[in-house]
Image (cartoon, helix red, strand yellow):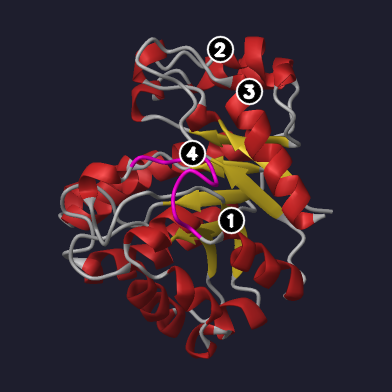
Amino acid sequence: MAQILCSTGALIGRPNNRDYRILRDVCHKLNCDGFEFMMYSTWYGLEGDILKFLLELNINIPVIHCEKHIGEYISKGSKEDLAEAVRRFEINCKMAKALSVHKMVVHLWDGVTSDSNFSNNLEAYGILRKIAEAYEIDLLIENVVCNHENPMKHWMELLNRYPDIHFIYDTKMAAFHCQENLLYDDKYDILWKEKHIRHYHVNDYGGGYMEWSRLKTLPPGKGHFDFDKFFDYIRKNGYKDTFTVEATAFGNDGKIDINMLNKCFEKIRRYIG
């Protein structure tokens, strides 16, 4: 049975002081099947408090989104940077284990350095994978936006090096690089036929090719991604697992647009039947 999740990153951000306790007030107002919990770099040192809060809240969390700056440390590539990436990654894994979560979304590259030193990222995957396996976590590498090459190229490089790798496909990230139609290209059908993709982020994009100023995550239908074609393809391929909405739901005042998110969940529910 497919599950439609809400990213906690859609709810918690700088305007509301990244206060994870907001979840207590909003989680039962959202008509989703659970949450993808996103870790922030400012929360290191608070892991115990966060875990206690989430366990007491007792909400369904099938997926964790690893803290993004880990990918930036990996991209920089010094021994010290890699050591910091590994240290942080293991903290994220420990949190996932404590919450009995088995899927983890990872930005293998990130930040200004992004994919400009991709050999660093290619090597680091093997290190992260071993750690994740020790915690019984399925590591999912996202098609994160690049500033040097493109995510599909890097996915195929990773697949060539690690034939049993798993991915998470983000519709907005693909559209940013004008790669959304590669999803349906026979050249890449190994990704779907052999079930390398284990999770989807369902978000929209309203800009053009690599238009950084318009990278904001939009609700499905507010950009130009063809969701009719996307979900038709998903249905035909028999995918019935997790989807996450990440559309930013808070404004500058930090208030959360519950209605907008519920419309997103309902739209996806209609698509997947």
Give the residue type at disc 4.
Asn
Please tell me which of labels 4 and 3 falls first in the chain. 4
Disc 4 from disc 2: Cα separation:
21 Å
Circles 4 and 3 in contact, beta carbons < 8 Å: no
Front disc: 4 or 3: 3
Please tell me which of labels 1 and 4 falls first in the chain. 4
Circles 3 and 1 in contact, beta carbons < 8 Å: no
> As displayed, is residue 93 above or below residue 127?
above
Q: Residue at x 42, y 44 (%)?
A: 89
Disc 3 from disc 1: Cα separation:
22 Å
Q: Which residues are magenta?
A: 216-225
Secondary structure, mark 1, is strand
Disc 1 from disc 2: Cα separation:
25 Å
Circles 1 and 4 in contact, beta carbons < 8 Å: no
Please tell me which of labels 3 and 1 falls first in the chain. 1
Q: Which mark is residue 259?
A: 3
Circles 3 and 2 in contact, beta carbons < 8 Å: no
Whether residue 236 sits left or right of residue 105 in the image: it is right
Whether residue 22 sits left or right of residue 1 in the image: it is left
Q: Residue at x 73, y 57 (%)?
A: 241
Disc 2 packing (10 Å; few <14; some 14–19; many ≥20) = some
Front disc: 1 or 4: 1
> As displayed, is residue 194 above or below residue 10?
below
Disc 3 packing (10 Å; few <14; some 14–19; many ≥20) = few
Q: Quadrant of residue 153?
A: bottom left
Give the residue type at disc 2.
Ile
